[in-house]
Image (cartoon, rainbow, N blue to C red):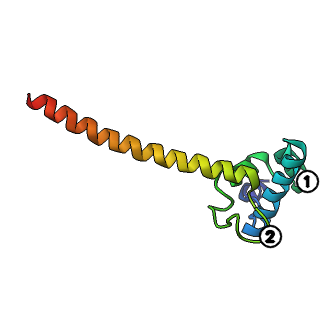
Amino acid sequence: MSNSNVNAAKGRRYTTKEKAEIIAFVDKVNSEKGRGGQSAASKKYKISPLTISSWIRSGIGGGSISASSGSGSVAGPIGKKLSKLQALHDQIAKAEKELGKLKSQFNALKAAL
């Protein structure tokens, strides 16, 4: 019995193309119904919703598929929103780093008074 548990833990590996197809299905259902794409894909492809969510967050296999590849947008509205969120996050991180440098300079000058 322990051997079957080991095999079950490995799981199936999906190609980038398969992931893109599943994410496209999620986007299609979401655009038609407004929501429920992840659940529908989970049932149709027999994949955990968490796995699908992980693919969406990571930009499908680490972002190796762009919206310009293939016909139409692969990640759809979700991908666009995630891209904007990532850009804003990067901008905030950069601003916080700069703010940290300014605070350090401020405190050094203040201590020198």
Figure check: 66 above or below 37: below
Cα–Cα span, label 2 and label 1: 22 Å
Amino acid tagged 2: Ser
User: In the rendered view, does 96 fall on the left or right side of 15?
Assistant: left
First in sequence: mark 2 vs mark 1: 1
Q: Estimate the x, y position of residue 37 in percent, counting from the top left.
A: 84, 47
Q: Secondary structure at mark 2?
A: loop
Which disc, if any, is residue 71?
Answer: 2
Find residue 104 and report its image quarter: top left
Which residue in the protein does label 1 denote? 44
Q: Residue at x 34, y 44 (%)?
A: 98
In the depicted structure, whether residue 36 falls above or below residue 15: above
Q: Position of residue 100 (x, y in %)?
A: 31, 39
Q: Position of residue 67 (x, y in %)?
A: 70, 63
Q: Are marks 2 and 1 in contact (CB under 8 Å)?
A: no
Crowd tier of the residue under label 2, counting other residues whose Cα lies within 10 Å: few below 14, some 14–19, many 20 or above: few
Q: Split into 4 quadrants, where in the image is the C terminus?
A: top left
Packing grade of label 1 (10 A; few <14, some 14-19, many >=20) is: few
Residue drawn at x 66%, y 57% as measured from the top left: 59
Residue 105 at x, y percent in the picture: 21, 38
Q: Amino acid at mark 1?
A: Lys
Closer to viewer: mark 2 or mark 1:
2
